[in-house]
Image: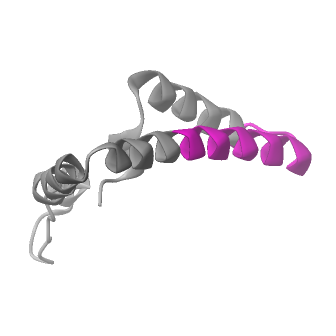
Amino acid sequence: MPRMKDILTKEEDQKVNELFIELLDAHSKKEAKLIKKEIDEIYETAKERYFSSLKGNKEQSSTKEKFFKYTLPKIRLKESQPQEIRAVLA
């Protein structure tokens, strides 16, 4: 299954990043909830677009799932690796 970051368009990703910065600077709980709601709406739009594209062609969707499965590497870090390397890989 792809990550949300893989599904977002460049514009959506940039907007979400800007909203996260606004969220950190929010002055009230109400303002933070409004920003979070906007982020959630962007995520829902992206999810709907992704799943509707999967419904379009089942053969193509299984190919997409395999693509995401094999292109998202799982990196396991050993405790013996220096902290700097772990920070770069994270």
Residue positioned 14% across, 71% down in the render: 76
Q: Indicate the quadrant where residue 21 lies.
A: top right
Q: Is residue 6 above or below residue 10?
A: below
**Closer to the camera in the image, 54 or 89:** 54
Residue drawn where x is 42% and y is 49% of the image: 51
In this rendered view, identify the residue nearer to me: 47 or 90. 47
Residue shown at 33% from the left, 48% from the top: 54
Residue 83 point in image, percent of width and height:
20, 62
Q: Which residues are magenta?
A: 24-45
Question: Who is closer to the viewer here, 47 or 51?
Answer: 51
Q: Position of residue 30 (x, y in %)?
A: 90, 46
Where is residue 38, by image quadrant? top right
Nearer to me, 39 or 19: 39
The scheme the figure's colours follow is one colour
- Residue displayed at 13% across by 63% down: 82
Where residue 79 appears, as percent x and y from the top left, is 15, 78
Determine if the magenta segment contains residue 80: no
> Residue 70 vs residue 90: left or right?
left
Q: How many marks?
A: 0
**Is 5 situated left or right of 37 in this image?**
left
Q: What quarter of the picture does the C terminus occupy?
A: bottom left
**Quadrant where the image shows the N terminus:** bottom left
Q: Is residue 27 above or below residue 85?
A: above
